[in-house]
Amino acid sequence: MEELKRKRGRHWKEEAVKVVLFTCAALSVVTTAGIVGVLARETFAFFEVVSLPSFLFGTEWRPLLVPRSFGILPLVCGTMMIVVGSSLIAIPLGLGSAIYLSEYASDRVRNIIKPVLEVLAGIPTVVYGYFALTFVTPIIRAVFPETQVFNAASASIVVGIMILPMVASLCDDALRAVPNSLREGAHALGATSFEVTGRVVLPAALSGVLASFVLAMSRAIGETMAVTLAAGATPNITANPLESIQTMTAYIVQVSLGDTPAGTVEYQTIFAVGALLFIITLGMNILSHQVLRRFQEVYE
Amino acid sequence: MTGLGRHHSANNLPARRRALAVFRFACAAMTWAAVLILVALLVHVARQGMSWLDWQFLSSFPSRFPDQAGIKSALFGTLWMISTTAIIAVPLGVGAAIYLEEYARRGALSTFIQINIANLAGVPSIVYGMLGLVIFVRFFLLGRSVLAGALTMSLLILPVIIIAAREAIRAVPGSLRQASYALGSTRWQTVRHHVLPSALPGIMTGVILALSRAIGETAPLVMIGALTYVAFVPEGPLDAFTTLPIQVFNWTSRPQKDFHALGAAGILVLLIVLLVMNTGAILIRHRAERRGG
């Protein structure tokens, strides 16, 4: 009888532990629901004042000054400029170093480079902002004197450096997942290492490589502190990287630094911008998963 | 794709070898560029900030006079924020990982939770700041407190902890579990006494990496309003606070050169804190590897 009671007690405890652990896991779903709920609530309130087309296609972003105008294209344009600029840095450098690390480098070099990339990935973004403002911008201004103090080029360069480790390590993983038998086969047919890399290994690893590009761009879109510090606060549709711009994230920071009371349209704009940011980055993350799944080569 | 025509690639061997040499050199140059960038960054920050980094800087509060300004409230604020975050996020993250690895049946629900966690890991940190602002600061009326910051930060790093802890738990051999079950243990006893101790070094490494990410995060804390003038050390979780990256951001965003130098000195303190934590992670990994043989 005693034995049975103890067993029942144990059973009860087992179930309790399971419920507690499940709650921990379910918290992530609650978090997602919270994000969507918070963004949606204020965004809907925003769209009672501003029409959706004038938000999405308006070319003038002037939410804080009268006459107000809520066209988000300048912010989207600023963000895209950072994405394009940082990709121009991170994609060639990241893919190049991944190819070097996985195909050519000795273990000794690998053991030096890998930790360096990890350190670069671990440096806080505000440090990159400082670096952009006090190191990269003066260099750009020395070359192009007409450059503004806050400019898209400098921010793009440091965001590129920031996402470079991500591109490098994901591409490295993808390249190393290509079985050696493919390389050996190509070498046996008389191909040089260059041809093996370009015509066999890279095409075989293409899904992982492309997925890493998409993920890195998504990170560049969400990057906040470096662009706030270095790219400026001028919503601006321009193609000139030497001009001051403003990204979606930098706008959100700008408003939250001021004392904007809840319930006003200014306060709601940051949620509308945040919702767009969330949708774009989520879409890109899903896209990168799809690329990985759809184009993955499967080896026995 | 390689710039070499298919037709004469078979016979023009010297040209093909040259192409290889050029390509290989280009890849090597791009790789070492990363090292060069890191060195440039560290040297630049050290040259700007080193002369400001002294005891007076560490033991003073922020000030509008650069030569009297210090980092004390930010340093203590970071320590408060990060220990509170650890207390909240580590049990939740490890608990979720245990559930997903040891308890959940492979089904629609567990797949849904997994996809959800993967997507949460990709949400920009500033969006978590907006969540924290609405839920913790305004709805739960926690204000701009250490607790509001730590809760926001916990949600941000939970996906990182869960993913790392799951990997560590998955690496524990199944034979260990079977042996424990064979001796009559329940599932929780097996997890508690065998799986967790064996996965602990891996979990710890992941936790430390996640916490170092939280130390460097600025945007979510700016969102919840932590960028204010704080000239005191928090004494409890409901006190206002500032952190190292926020103080760095504050100083860097001012136009004066002296404040930029203060920013550099603040970055040095921040990097030293991160270095100490990561050294800890490496030591734990090494000890575990030695013990595990």
Image (tube, coloured by chain):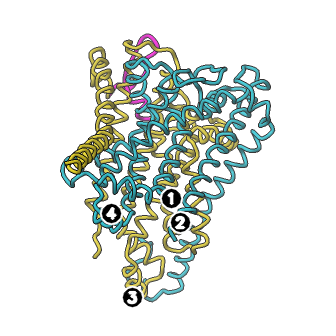
Chain colours: A yellow, B cyan
Q: Amino acid at mark 2?
A: Glu
Q: CA distance from mark 2 to mark 1?
A: 30 Å
Residue A47 part of the magenta-drawn span: no
* Residue A94: image tag: 1
Mark 4 secondary-structure assignment: helix
* Residue B289: image tag: 2
Start-end of magenta stretch:
A57-77
Residue located at (49% from left, 73% from top): A103
* Subunit that carries the residue with mark 2: B
- x, y (%) of residue A168? 49, 59
Mark 1 secondary-structure assignment: helix
Residue located at (38% from left, 26% from top): A59
Q: Are marks 3 and 4 in contact (CB under 8 Å)?
A: no
Labels 4, 2: front one: 4
Residue located at (79% from left, 30% from top): B56
Front residue of this view, candidates B252 and B97:
B97
Q: Which residue is mark 4?
A: B180
Q: Split into 4 quadrants, where in the image is the N terminus of chain B?
A: bottom left
Q: CA distance from mark 3 to mark 2?
A: 42 Å
Residue located at (62% from left, 33% from top): B244
Q: Amino acid at mark 1?
A: Gly
Q: Which residue is mark 3?
A: A189
